[in-house]
Image (cartoon, rainbow, N blue to C red):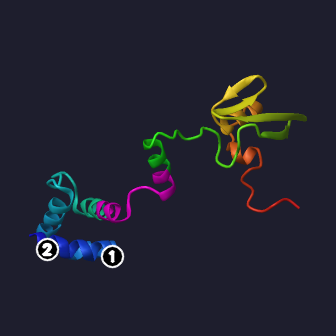
């Protein structure tokens, strides 16, 4: 049983998910039990069961999370709290944006953003306070340009 699961795991984790469809029901159930440590939920249709199995095998082989998120979580576990301000913005920076004929200055804080005497937790929340319309905060303040302005 372990040999079949190991053989299937190597095939599945190094190739595409279509390989799972070549396994019979008993092999799939054995692979699930050996690799995930529990029985297959009886209510799952085969197509969903195969997808979940492949996902879990890939997650184990390649880690579930994007490497930058894993690194952030590792820092938090080590006792270094993440900064609440937007990535790439240092506390003390001032963002300037003209809207409605008025110049708006937003200061980047350690744990948010200050505008017009109030503190906001995100740039999007700040942009909403300024405009009354939902905006991507980085886009509103011109921080996500793909190409530099000419």
Say left or right for 128 vs 105.
left
Q: Is residue 47 magenta?
A: no
Q: Is residue 31 above or below residue 120?
A: below
* Foreground residue among 12 and 76: 76
Q: Which residue matches tag 1?
A: 14
Residue at (76% x, 22% y) in the render: 117
Quadrant position of the C terminus in the picture: bottom right
Residue 75 image offset from top left, x and y in percent: 48, 46
Residue 120 image offset from top left, x and y in percent: 67, 30
As drawn, the residue found furthest toward the top would be 117
Categorize mark 1 by other alpha carbons within 10 Å: few (<14), some (14-19), many (20+): few
Q: Quadrant of residue 17?
A: bottom left
Count of labels in the image: 2
Q: Which mark is residue 4?
A: 2
Residue at (76% x, 34% y) in the render: 107
For label 2, the SS is helix
Q: Is residue 116 above or below residue 23?
A: above
Residue at (72% x, 48% y) in the render: 139
Q: Is residue 133 above or below residue 75?
A: above
**Labels 1 and 2: the sequence-earlier one:** 2
| Magenta region, main secondary structure | helix
Quadrant position of the N terminus in the picture: bottom left
Residue at (33% x, 61% y) in the render: 55
Say left or right for 107 vs 64.
right
Which region shows up in magenta? Answer: 55-71
């Amino acid at each position: 049983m372990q040999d079949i699961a190991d053989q299937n795991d190597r095939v599945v984790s190094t190739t595409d998910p279509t390989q799972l469809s070549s396994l019979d029901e008993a092999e799939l159930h054995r692979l699930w039990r050996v690799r995930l440590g529990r029985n297959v939920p009886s209510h799952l249709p085969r197509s969903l069961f195969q997808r979940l199995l492949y996902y879990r095998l890939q997650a184990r082989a390649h880690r579930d999370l994007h490497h930058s998120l894993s690194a952030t979580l590792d820092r938090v576990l080590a006792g270094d709290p993440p900064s609440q301000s937007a990535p790439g913005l240092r506390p003390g920076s001032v963002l300037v944006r003209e809207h409605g004929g008025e110049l708006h200055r937003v200061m980047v804080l350690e744990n948010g953003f200050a505008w017009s005497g109030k503190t906001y937790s995100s740039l999007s929340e700040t942009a909403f306070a300024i405009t009354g319309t939902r905006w991507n905060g980085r886009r509103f303040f011109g921080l996500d340009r793909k190409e530099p302005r000419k």
